[in-house]
Structure formats: C-alpha cells, structure tokens
Image (tube, rainbow, N blue to C red):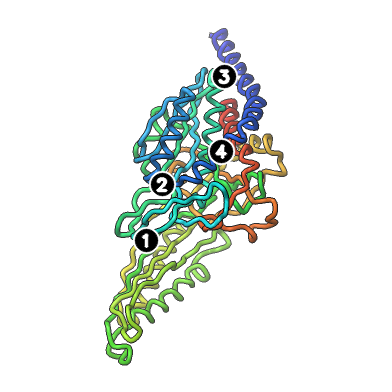
Amino acid sequence: MKKHFIIALLAVATSSFAQSKLKPSLSQKADALKSKVIAWRRDFHEHPELGNQEFRTAEIVAKHLKSLGIEVQEKVAYTGVVGVLKGGKPGPVVALRADMDGLPVTERVNIPFKSQVVTYYNGQKTGVMHACGHDSHMAILMAVAEILASEKANLAGTVKFIFQPSEEGVYNANGESILSGAELMVKEGVLENPKVEAIFGLHISAGSENGVLEYKPGATMAAVDQLDIVVKGKQAHGANPWLGVDPIVTSSQIITGLQTIVSRNVNITEDPAIVTVGAIHGGIRQNIIPESVKMIGTIRTFGVEQRELVHKRIKEIATNIAESAGAKADVTIGTGYPVTFNNVALVEKMLPTLQAINGKERVRQIPAHTGAEDFSFFQQKVPGFFFFLGARPADKKSVNEVAAHHTPDFYLEESEFQVGVKALSHLVVDYFEKK
C-alpha cells in the first residue's frame, strides 16, 4: 500500500513539473502567432454576423479546430462551436470561452478591413459591426487552441473550447428577449460530457491601457433586466386636456419617480444600481393627447436582494403614479443576464498566473462594470474567472478619448493581443498543475 502511495505521489509531482516546463514554450508560440491572430481578427471584423446568424464565422472556427486534431461539435445553441482537446495525461476539465456575434451598428472607422455588411434588424436597415471586440476574442482563442493542441501529449487534463453565439442577446419579432447563447449552451449541456470544473473568459477593453490585464473578484459585471412600461390614459383633443387622461405627462412623472430608486432606496455604499429609460413612444399628432405611451429601458444591479428591491420599487412607483393621475401602468420586467460573478477562491488561486505572464504592475484590480455579460450563465454552474485585456490606442491617453463599445467609431489597438493568448493558455496549464 505504501509503495503504491509513493508511486502515486511521484506521478503527481512529475505531472506538475511537466506542466511548469510547458510555460516558456506557450509564451514563445503566442508571440509567433501574433500576425496570425491579427489576420483572423481582421477577417472576422470585415465579415461580422449577428447573433444566431454566425454561419460563416462558425465554419471558419470549426475548420481551424478540426485541422488541429481537436474533437469538434457544431451547431451548438444554433451556431455555436465546441472543441474538446484531451491531453496526453489525466486531469481536470477546463473550459475557455469566446463569443462570436456582431452588433447592428454601421461602422464609421476608416480602416482597410471596415465592415460593409448591411442587414435588416427590428425592421430597420442597418450596418453590422464587431463593435464590442468579439472578433478579437475569437482570434485569441483560436490561437490558444493551436498552441495547446501542439502540446497535447504534455497536457495533464482536458480543454473545452467554447465559441459561443449571440452574447449580445437575441430578440423576437415583438422585441422580446429570448435565450442568450450562453444560457442556451448551458441548457444543451455544454458544461457536461466531459464535466467542466472551471471556466475562464476574456473580454477586450477599448478604454483600458493597451496590454494591461484587469480583473475584479466577486461581482464583476451587472445583472441586466429589460423594462417595459405601458401607460394607458384617455385620448382627448390637445385643446381640451381636461376631457382626457394624459399618458405623456404621467409618463414624465413616472420617469422622474424612477430616479429616486437609486438615489433614495438603494444602499449605494454596498453596490451601484441603474434604472435607465431608453425610449418613449406615444402620440401621432401635435394636438392629440394619445391613449397610451410605451417606455422601454434597462435595469442594472449587483446583488439578488438589490435586484428584488429595484424591481419592486419600479412596479410600485409606476403603478401608483399612474393611478394618482387616473391612468394605469402595466409594468413588465424581463429577466436578462445574472451578475457576472468571479469565484473569489479561483481568482485568488489563478491571479499569480496573470501576474507572471504580464508583470504585477500590468495586472490591475478594477471596480465593477455596469455592463452585463452572459458569461454569467456559465458561472452559475461552475467556478469562473472573467477578466479584461486593454486595447486602447497609444495616441489616446484616457478612456474619455476613446469611442465606447457598441458605437460606430469603436476601435481596437491590435499590438498586444498575444497577452490574451498567453493569459488563457497559461491559466489552463497552471490550473492543471495546481490540481
């Protein structure tokens, strides 16, 4: 028995040593693939596809993974691609994720690989653009797959590469949100067979210093919910408002009332929250008080109790203000993405990996983002670590000088993409070693 135990310990020690020896090779190969990553990214950028329509994109990804000898499953959650790389030695299963979809945004940036794609979205003609960096995420993960596949015999575990569709969400003809790519992938069992033990994801950040890695333990990105309010009044001539119930005036009072939720109801010393009305639709003529007004908006929260409180107050404020005016408010809150929550223990364990490949001074803890990410659906099932890679152009000194994500002028500096390649590949190997 003692002999067998010693042999097992030696096997573990040998495996860990082998994983450590891999790391210099991973970094060298990441640097060697720099131009390839940029070329992949530019091709994806020039040919963006909206959520659940990533047919060309998925074909390129699948072809690349197959060429590396990776087991590939296609059409996961409609257009997703999943690759499984089984290492030469037994060990845990780690997943890496990249999102694939573009946005209904018409690009204004004058670059050789500018998107010229045009489509119809929600009944409107629009351009299509990778205005959030998903093109770079795919290119980086394709390089990671190539590097790890080249070291297959030395890997002490299994890597699952998840190329996910529709991170930006998908909406039906009525403008109602349906399952995101991550949520549907989870429902279809992407974290099973083989069962994933931990998952890592990276997001490019146009406003952050080029090549810097950023992270936050715990709540990292907000939960997001869709808000719909229909205020029903009584139509009347604009010259005789006393004969009707004005839903426009009532809506304006509701909007003002909603602002008190964050300023007066939420404990902002614990977590921030946001209630934004993004559009108001009502009326057709200057001298007619309409019968109804529709408002749509977004809600961002960082905790379960906070989320429940904000939802409750929205309904109370809207319905009570409407009632006081003689109107009626129908409030619908569509549940979106949960909080992107980085497993604290996993962050603590893997942070040294990021610091080792990029230097402690270029790995920085940041405040929470009020943006949202459906990576959170993976994190609800297994421990996850989602972090950011800066890609701010050198001539821009601060985030205020940079075009925001989801805008026509969005632009990324490409020179440090290999930092992301190193980060993801080293996280895999170090996780195997630590296990």
Closer to the N terminus: mark 1 or mark 2?
1
Between the C-alphas of marks 1 and 3, the distance is 52 Å
Between the C-alphas of marks 1 and 2, the distance is 19 Å
Residue tagged by mark 1?
124
Residue tagged by mark 3?
154
Residue 346 relative to residue 82: left or right: right
Q: Depth-wise, is mark 1 or mark 3 nearer the camera?
A: 1
Residue 390 image position (x, y, % from top left): 63, 47
Q: Residue at 64%, 60% (x, y): give it.
A: 401
Residue tagged by mark 4?
39
- Compared with 109, 44 (above or below) is above
Residue type at mark 3 is Asn
> Considering depth in this image, is 176 or 232 the residue closer to the camera?
176
The disc label shown at residue 166, or none: 2
> Considering depth in this image, is 305 or 51 the residue closer to the camera?
51
Tally of numbered discs: 4
Residue type at mark 1 is Gln
- Compared with 90, 357 (above or below) is below
Residue 354 image position (x, y, % from top left): 64, 37
> Which secondary structure, mark 3?
helix
Q: Depth-wise, is mark 3 or mark 4 nearer the camera?
A: 4
Q: Residue at 44%, 52% (x, y): give it.
A: 128
| Residue 182 visible at all | no
Between the C-alphas of marks 1 and 4, the distance is 31 Å
Q: Depth-wise, is mark 3 or mark 2 nearer the camera?
A: 2
Q: Depth-wise, is mark 2 or mark 4 nearer the camera?
A: 4
> Which secondary structure, mark 1?
strand
